[in-house]
Image (cartoon, rainbow, N blue to C red):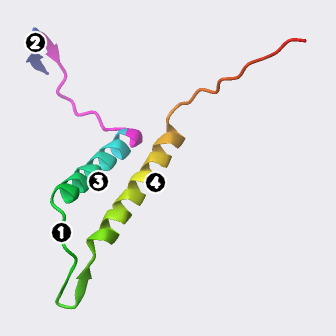
Amino acid sequence: MAYVTGKWASTERIMATDIENLKTIKSNILASVVEYTANPKPSYILDGQEVEWTEWFEAMMQRVKEIDELIAAEEPYEIMSQGVTP
């Protein structure tokens, strides 16, 4: 326990949920993409290994799309419908 803002609070670490982990992964990927777009790098070959930044960018955006789909599948949703009486 720790004394925080006038009261005792637990310092016990609560594990993140799967949704929180997915959102963190997405956030980290997007941070990398933002850095790449702010400072684009040229593709190159080093010791016979090719680094293609355009492919990396496309792969990261595909991962974001996949994570969005996983998050949407796990989060609660609401179906709106309208009834009509004769």
**43 w.r.t. 36: above or below:** below
Which residue corresponds to mark 3? 29
Rendered residue at 46%/42% (across/down) = 71
**76 w.r.t. 22: above or below:** above
Amino acid carrying label 3: it is: Ile
Tag 4's secondary structure?
helix
Which of the two labelled residues, at mark 2 and mark 3, occupies the earlier sequence position? 2
Amino acid carrying label 4: it is: Glu
Which residue corresponds to mark 4? 66
Magenta stretch holds residue 3: no
Left or right of 15, for residue 36 = left
Instruction: Report, in whole angstroms, how far the alpha carbon at label 1 lies from the one at label 4.
Output: 25 Å
**11 w.r.t. 85: above or below:** below
Which of the two labelled residues, at mark 4 and mark 2, occupies the earlier sequence position? 2
Tell me, for residue 5, which label it has, or none.
2
Which residue corresponds to mark 1? 41
Rendered residue at 23%/86% (across/down) = 49
Magenta stretch holds residue 9: yes
